[in-house]
Amino acid sequence: MSFLRRPVVLMVLGIVVLGLGGLAFASRDTTKTDPAAATRCIFPPCRASADPVPARGYEGGYVVADPADPDHVVITDTNVLDTKCGFHTTFNRGKDWIDGYYDLPNGFTGCRINAPSGGHVASGSIARGSGARIYAVFGSASADDNRRESVLVATSNDGGKTFGPAKVAMKPTGPDIGLARPLMSVVPGTNGPDIVLLSAWTCHPGVPAGTQCDGALFARSDDGGGTYSTPVVVNGPPAGQNTSQPAMDRDGTIFQTYQVRFNDGPVELYLAKSTDGGKTFTQSLLDRQIQIGVQYDAAKLVADPLTGNLYTVWADQRTGRFQIFFRKSADKGVSWGERSVLLAPDRDATGASRSPSISVAPNGRIDVVYYHTSPSPDAQNFDDVYWEYSTDAGDNFIARQVNETPIDRTKGYSGPAGSLRQLGNHYPPGVSSTDQAAYIVWSDTREATDITNTEDVVLRKMEVLGAAQPPP
C-alpha cells in the first residue's frame, strides 16, 4: 500500500488542509469594495428597476430621498404594459432594487392607461413621513363603482421595503364622476401623527374633451393615513383643472393651485387658500396667459418650511414657445414677485421647456426640474432634462443639464407632445431635495429598440457644488 493511501496519514493531511483553509478564511479581508459605489446614479444615471424584461414600459416617475441616508431612495411609477402602479426602493443607491406593486382592495383593477376618468396614467406622487414611513398615492378603478377611478394611498413603515394594503382615500364625488391625477404632500409629525394632504381632479367620463374635467379637490388625514376627510372642491365657478399638490405652511394655512381652461380664451392660473384646515377655500388669480401648461401640465407649488415662502412654477407660451416661469410669495399668496423665466441654454427662448416639478431642501434650497427641447429643427423629437437650483430664495438660479444622452421620444410610450403616442404628452420629471443633492427621475428610452420600445424611469443624483456631505 502506498504511504499516501494509509488511512491515518490521509486523516492527518485532511486535518492540516482544513486547518490551513480555516486560518485563511478567518484572516481574509471581509470588506468588499464596490468600485462603482462612488459614482453610481451620479454619472451616468441608473435604471430605477430590476425588471429584466426587455419590453418594459415605465412612466410617471416620482422620487423621495432620505436626508439622513444618501443611498436610500424610493421611486413610484406606473408599468404601462402591466397597467399596475408600483414602487422601486434602493438602500445602496441603485446597486440593488426592491420592486413591487401595491396590494389593492377587492374589486380594484390596477392603473389603466387612458382611463375613462381622464388623466392617461393614474400614478401619483410619493412623500416621506416621520421615521421610516413612506406614503404613495395613485388612482385605481373599482369594478363595483362602474370602473371609475378612486384615489388610493399605500403606506410603508419600513422605508419602502414593503407597502401595506392600499386604502381608498377619496371616492368619486358623484354618479357621473371619476377622479384623476392625484398628488400628495406630507407634513411629518413631530409630537403626533403625520398629516397627509391630497389633491385630485373630478372628471366626467364620456363628456367631450375640454369640459371632461372641471373640479379640483382637496382631502387630508390627521392620523397618518388612517382616515381621510370628505373631499372639498377648492375652485370657484366655473371650473378647475390641472390642480397642483397641496402645500401647508408653518402656520397650517393650506394652498393649492389650479387652472381654468377655456377653448376660446386664455388659461387662468388660480391660488386656492384655506385658513381653516381645508374645510373652505378662497380663490385669487395668480396669472393669465394664452396658454398655460401642455394639456395636463399642472403648475406645481411648495411651501418653504424655514421661511414660510410659497414657490410656484409652470410652463406658458408668452414668449411664443413654452418656457418655465417661477414666482414667489412672502405673504401667504396675497402678493407675488415678478415672473422669472427659467431659461435653458438657448437664451433667446427659441427652444421649448415644459412639465416642471419643484422641491425644497431642508436648508431652503429650491430645486426645479423640467424637460427642454432644443430649437434645432433636427432635435424636435428629443428631450433633455434640466435642473435649476437657487440658494437665495429664488432670486437667482444655477442651471445644469441632467441627462447625458438626448431622450428619443419617437420610441417608448410617451412620444413628443404633438405626436400623441400611446400616452400623449409627457409626465414631468420628478425631484426630491436633500441639503447635499437633488435626486431626479425621468422617463428615458436609451435602451429602446424598434422591437422592444423600452421605456424606463431613470435616476440621477445631482450633487450641489460645495455642499457638505452628511456624516456616515
Image (cartoon, rainbow, N blue to C red):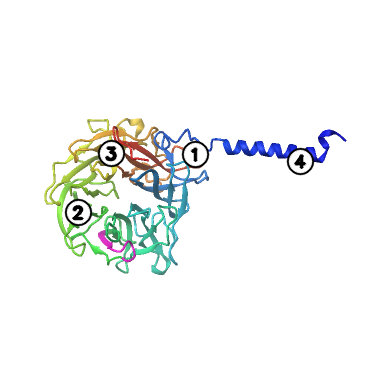
For the residue labelled by badge 3, is the local secondary structure a helix, a strand or a loop? Answer: strand
Distance between the Cα atoms at labels 2 and 4? 76 Å
Please report whichever mark, 3 or 1, sits nearer to the chain's N-terminal start: 3
- Residue assigned mark 2: 250
Residue drawn at x 19%, y 38% is 392
For the residue labelled by badge 1, is the local secondary structure a helix, a strand or a loop? Answer: loop
**Cβ–Cβ below 8 Å for labels 3 and 2?**
no
Where is residue 224? Give x, y as percent.
32, 61
Distance between the Cα atoms at labels 2 and 1? 51 Å
Please report whichever mark, 2 or 4, sits nearer to the chain's N-terminal start: 4
In front: mark 2 or mark 4? 4
For the residue labelled by badge 4, is the local secondary structure a helix, a strand or a loop? Answer: helix
For the residue labelled by badge 2, is the local secondary structure a helix, a strand or a loop? Answer: loop
Where 163 sits versus 320, above or below?
below
Amino acid at circle 2: Arg
**Which mark identifies residue 353?**
3
- Residue assigned mark 1: 450
Please report whichever mark, 3 or 2, sits nearer to the chain's N-terminal start: 2
Q: Nearer the viewer, residue 82 or 336?
A: 336
Magenta extent: 214-227
- Residue 348's quadrant in the figure? top left
Amino acid at circle 3: Ser
Where is residue 360? Give x, y as percent.
26, 45
In front: mark 3 or mark 2? 2
Amino acid at circle 4: Met
Residue drawn at x 66%, y 38% is 19
* Label 3 crowd (10 A; few <14 / some 14-19 / many >=20): many
- Residue assigned mark 4: 11
